[in-house]
Amino acid sequence: MRVVVTGASGQVGAYLLQPLRQTGWTVFPWSGASRGHWGGSPLIPVDLTDETAIERELSKADPDAVLHIAAISAADQVRRAPARGRVVNVDATRRIARWCGDRERRLVFASTDMVFDGERSWYTENDEPRPILAYGETKRDAEIEALKAPNSAVARLCLLYGPSRCGRETFLDRSLASLRAGSPQTFFNDEYRTPLDFQTAAQILVELVRSERRGILHVGGRERLSRFDLMSRIAQALGLDPALVQANSRADVVFQEPRPADLSLNTSLLADLFPHLERPGVEEAVRRMDS
């Protein structure tokens, strides 16, 4: 099978390298402006604001499936540059979905838990998206475009954590560096997600490409945790001083946009779809990262 992976040079894309290698598929790794290599393959720079470039590279690769994970995923970036956020996150998805739909190709699109407003817990795939962030709005609209392709699936990803494999720091890298230096770090104790490690998320995305699942699927961990809960358990698992992990409230910070309070995802459908796929708890995930 021939597979295009957009966003291959990003955080999730770097974790996709190993599980995709194991499939034996021919992979075409797209990047934005990044050049270099992705495993043994050269990255293919594709500007997602350029409709001609998208069409040209899709036709050149002629993939059986597209795993579309590229996006402007930093909420602040979309807030500051909403027009570019819409072009990259929505318009590019529309073009890719149209190409896949016209040729009956498989499309798996990576969305986010931030399509919800955070007013309740344990959102299911049937709950109506009501984003309150500009980023969430672009991803909700992109979901609509992706699902226009008949053989498409949308993976709503939760908060992902783990060390970077792409050369750009993750929030975990920054937090652990400070904790190891003895610097106290504060984390919200009243903002909830269902965190999942990058490695497991990548494995699920590859399984979703090969599956016949269509429509929306929530991809997250089994536990509802605040960032304070998550970092406390990670610090303890790594033998770091737990006193350095301190709690604060969303009310302590002034935001440019409102932040959803609870984006926990119900992932029972995921468990039913891939019963063989283990989703490790925080301590086990950290042990694997550290090994």
Image: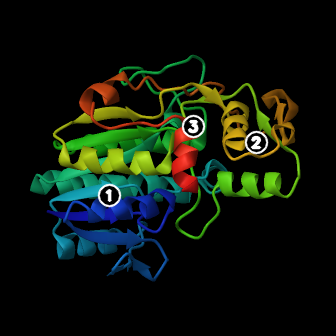
- In whole angstroms, how far apart are the C-alphas of marks 3 and 1? 21 Å
Q: Is residue 35 left or right of residue 67?
A: right
- Tell me the element at label 3: helix
Q: Quadrant of the C terminus?
A: bottom right
- Which percent across, then down, holds residue 258? 70, 33
- Which percent across, then down, holds residue 186? 83, 40
For residue 24, above or below residue 60: above
Q: Residue at x 46, y 27 (%)?
A: 129
Quick one: label 1 or label 2, which is nearer the N terminus?
A: 1
Q: Which dot marks residue 256?
A: 2
Q: Viewer-proximal residue, 114 or 11?
A: 11
Q: Is residue 95 visible?
A: no
Q: Amino acid at mark 3?
A: Val
The residue that mark 1 highlights is 19
The residue that mark 3 highlights is 282
Instruction: Quadrant for residue 37, please give it.
Output: bottom left
Q: Amino acid at mark 1?
A: Pro
Q: Is residue 172 left or right of residue 208?
A: right
Quick one: label 3 or label 1, which is nearer the N terminus?
A: 1
Q: Viewer-proximal residue, 6 or 97?
A: 6
